[in-house]
């Protein structure tokens, strides 16, 4: 694994919100082409970590590197250029209500390329085909199901052929079958498009279905990073309680 | 005493912060309008036209009714006073001047602040709480350029048009009362209404509409982008947006009227 190139490197990241430390001294590397899952309970800071890695929000201390570029030191224009190499799938899909499914997917292409509108439309259709939504181009986001919205969000995230795709709770609120469909899509797209996928989730089935490596975050601290087997066989009580869903253990519900 | 001073200090600090953020947002919007096309970021005309239809065309009826009835009320209120001095005929010029200089632009702006300002905040606020603004940002699409620019351009062009319609409706309202209840001859009413109405009355009124358009749009966008906390947050932001727009419209009107009054512009 160590021979592989590092896509994103997180070093000693610390984030404070309203005087409360939400991330403390987080460090890990994410390798190119892998599916890296960040898991942790609600409010553990995993979504904040995802947003820091994607450049959406800054961190107070520490550094995030995308290859050799230090995210914290980029100008606004440089950051915008970098963002075009990232894709993001939101928990709520975050589709623009006033645009159709196809317009949502083609939006990044219209904004950042000079392609002819016919080619843009064709590309959008192709991306929708990759997520199994051909024929839904003219639907409005409010008229399709939650699972379909997430898939449209995924098609939009890969519209500009990004190198890294961030997923924030991609299976939250979906039934088990749609969960499996979305998980397969993540795996499929990661492989087909040679992406690096960074997934934040607390759905254990998803975690073990898609992850190459897993990071466990608890109360803003990184507890462990490892492969599926390493996490399954972890000696850390917090990790064991979380992956097995035990009520008794070091993680208390009222914390 | 110290706590009172601390409270005042905190309030002043917060107002300064809000004012500087608001100014920054306005400058960013103007930047994208003026310099965007030179940076391969042209203005989205189809979105601007859609906004013009929503803001302008769909507001004509409400603006017409508000100013029409205000014109009627103005004529009814002024008539008894002018009658005492034997000058009931001057109801025509009183209505036309006060509508064109003051009531037309202000009432139109207040109606539009309630209808459009609230809609802008609710739309952008909902987008904010549903992660859509963040999605635009992650896609390296400036939410200000994508959302605020078409709205500002549309209202900047449509509010003066609506104000002209409001002026005409207000004068018509006064005309209806003047020619029916006050028994003023129709031709004479129109002659007096136009005789005392100067170009200055028209352009001072219309110049206010441009300023009000900027206030309504930018307050709406600012409050929308500042929205926090789900549906309750959207409701709160919408209320703040409308109230702030109302206050700023009245303050701006007073300042501009003062400028025209004291400097004789």
Image: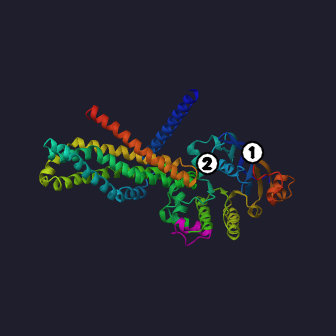
Q: Which mark is residue A26?
A: 1
- Which residues fall within the magenta stretch? A125-143
Q: Is residue B8 above or below residue A82?
A: above
Any magenta on residue A75? no
The alpha-carbon separation of the residues under discs 1 and 2 comes to: 17 Å
Colouring: rainbow
Any magenta on residue A127? yes
Q: Is residue B59 above or below residue B105?
A: below
**x%, y% of residue B189?**
15, 51
Give the chain letter at badge 2. A
User: In the rendered view, does B244 fall on the left or right side of B205?
Assistant: right
Which quadrant is the C terminus of chain B positioned in? Answer: top left
Give the chain letter at badge 1. A
**x%, y% of residue A191?**
70, 63
Q: Nearer the viewer, residue A132 or B163?
A: B163
Q: In this figure, what is the number of numbered marks?
A: 2
Q: Residue at x 49, y 66 (%)?
A: A118
User: In the rendered view, does A30 fall on the left or right side of B163?
Assistant: right
Disc 2 packing (10 Å; few <14; some 14–19; many ≥20): some
Q: Residue at x 17, y 56 (%)?
A: B180
Q: Which residue is mark 2?
A: A56
Report helix, strand or loop for mark 2: loop
Which quadrant is the N terminus of chain B positioned in? Answer: top right
């Amino acid at each position: 694994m160590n021979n592989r190139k590092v896509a994103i490197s997180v070093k000693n990241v610390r984030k404070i919100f309203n005087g409360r430390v939400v991330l403390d001294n987080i460090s890990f590397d994410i390798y190119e082409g892998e599916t890296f899952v960040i898991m942790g309970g609600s409010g553990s800071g995993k979504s904040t970590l995802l947003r820091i890695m994607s450049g959406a929000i800054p961190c107070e201390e520490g550094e995030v590197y995308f290859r050799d570029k230090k995210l914290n030191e980029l100008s606004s224009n440089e950051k915008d250029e970098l963002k075009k190499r990232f894709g993001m799938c939101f928990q709520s899909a975050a589709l623009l209500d006033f645009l159709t499914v196809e317009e949502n997917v083609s939006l990044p292409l219209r904004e950042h390329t000079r392609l002819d509108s016919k080619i843009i439309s064709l590309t959008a259709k192709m991306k929708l085909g990759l997520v199994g939504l051909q024929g839904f181009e003219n639907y409005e986001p409010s008229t399709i199901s939650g699972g379909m919205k997430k898939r449209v969000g995924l098609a939009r995230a890969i519209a500009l052929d990004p190198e890294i795709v961030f997923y924030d709770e991609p299976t939250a609120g979906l039934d088990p079958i749609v969960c499996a469909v979305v998980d397969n899509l993540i795996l499929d797209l990661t492989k087909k498009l040679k992406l690096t996928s960074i997934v934040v989730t607390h759905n254990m089935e998803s975690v073990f279905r898609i992850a190459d490596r897993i990071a466990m975050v608890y109360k803003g601290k990184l507890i462990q990073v490892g492969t599926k087997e390493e996490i399954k066989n972890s000696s850390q009580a917090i990790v064991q309680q979380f992956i097995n869903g035990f009520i008794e253990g070091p993680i208390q519900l009222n914390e | 005493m110290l706590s009172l001073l601390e409270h005042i200090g905190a309030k002043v600090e917060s107002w300064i912060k809000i004012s500087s953020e608001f100014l920054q947002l306005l400058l960013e919007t103007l930047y994208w309008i003026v310099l965007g096309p030179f940076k391969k970021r042209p203005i989205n005309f189809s979105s601007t036209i859609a906004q013009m239809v929503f803001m302008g065309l769909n507001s004509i009826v409400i603006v017409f009714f508000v100013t029409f009835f205000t014109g009627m009320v103005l004529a009814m209120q002024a008539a008894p006073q002018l009658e005492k001095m034997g000058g009931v005929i001057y109801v025509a010029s009183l209505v036309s001047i006060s509508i064109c200089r003051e009531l037309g632009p202000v009432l139109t702006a207040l109606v539009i602040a309630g209808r459009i300002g609230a809609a802008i905040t609710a739309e952008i606020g909902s987008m904010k709480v549903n992660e859509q603004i963040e999605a635009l940002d992650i896609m390296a699409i400036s939410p200000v350029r994508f959302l605020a620019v078409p709205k500002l351009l549309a209202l900047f062009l449509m509010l003066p048009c609506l104000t002209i319609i409001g002026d005409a409706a207000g004068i018509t309202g006064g005309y209806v009362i003047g020619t029916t209840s006050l028994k003023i001859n129709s031709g004479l009413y129109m002659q007096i209404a136009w005789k005392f109405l100067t170009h200055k009355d028209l352009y001072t009124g219309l110049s206010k509409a441009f300023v009000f358009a900027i206030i309504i749009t930018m307050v709406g966008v600012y409050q929308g982008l500042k929205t926090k906390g789900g549906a309750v947050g959207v409701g709160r932001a919408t209320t703040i947006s409308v109230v702030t727009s109302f206050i700023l419209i009245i303050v701006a009107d007073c300042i501009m009227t003062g400028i025209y009054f004291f400097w004789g512009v």
